[in-house]
Image (cartoon, helix red, strand yellow):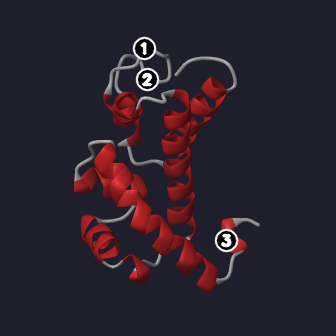
């Protein structure tokens, strides 16, 4: 079922679960709090409030989509790169794939567009299918 068709209660449950997990992922990736907020598409103050009280987080369909993509990127990295340090640092390292043009993947993600999250997720999913990230 698409995120936008889930009940408000279900979206709240999903949002709380996501906000209990996401700060750990953003920390593992070496993101500043402002960068974590940008990836989620919220102001810094909203991110801090949601982080402090995940059960009070009110993620809309856009935030849940972003969170789904972020969780997918995290999972794909840990499948592709079983070494935890390598998986967590991949976003920060320069990448010569044409998608990144020598920049780090996190630089692309920090443009703040959901489409960039999607492109990185798609790249990693394709790598899982036989190539290398």
Q: Residue furthest right?
A: 1
Nearer to the camera, 4 or 55: 55
Q: Is residue 88 above or below residue 48?
A: above
From the image, tell me which residue sits under label 3.
4
User: What is the spatial separation of the Cα atoms under label 1 and label 2, in whole angstroms?
Assistant: 6 Å
Answer with left or right where residue 96 lies relative to residue 65. left
Q: Quadrant of the N terminus?
A: bottom right
Please report the residue visible at 55 percent of the width from the left and 78 percent of the height from the top. 13
Answer with left or right where residue 34 lies relative to residue 72. left
Label 3 element class: helix
**Residue 64 placed where, x, y %?**
54, 64
User: What is the spatial separation of the Cα atoms under label 1 and label 3, in whole angstroms?
Assistant: 36 Å
From the image, tell me which residue sits under label 1.
96
Is residue 20 visible from the viewing direction of this image? yes
Q: Dot 1: within a 10 Å radius of its alpha carbon, few (fewer than 14), some, or many (20 or more) residues?
A: few
Please report the residue visible at 47 percent of the width from the left and 74 percent of the height from the top. 16
The image quadrant of residue 94 is top left
From the image, tell me which residue sits under label 2.
100
Is residue 38 visible from the viewing direction of this image? no
Q: Are marks 1 and 2 in contact (CB under 8 Å)?
A: yes
Label 2 element class: loop
**Residue 78 placed where, x, y %?**
50, 36
**Residue 101 placed where, x, y %?**
41, 18
Please report the residue visible at 38 percent of the width from the left and 28 percent of the height from the top. 86
């Amino acid at each position: 079922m698409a995120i936008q068709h889930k009940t408000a209660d279900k979206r709240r449950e999903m949002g709380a679960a996501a906000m209990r997990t996401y700060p750990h992922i953003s920390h593992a990736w070496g993101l500043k709090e402002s960068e974590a907020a940008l990836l989620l598409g919220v102001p810094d103050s909203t991110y801090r409030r949601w982080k402090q009280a995940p059960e009070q987080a009110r993620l809309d369909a856009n935030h849940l989509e972003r969170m789904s993509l972020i969780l997918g990127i995290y999972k794909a990295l840990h499948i592709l790169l079983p070494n935890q340090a390598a998986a967590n640092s991949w976003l920060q390292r320069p990448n010569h794939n044409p998608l990144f043009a020598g920049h780090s993947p996190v630089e692309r993600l920090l443009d703040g567009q959901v489409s960039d999250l999607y492109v990185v997720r798609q790249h990693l999913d394709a790598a899982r299918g036989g190539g290398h990230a």
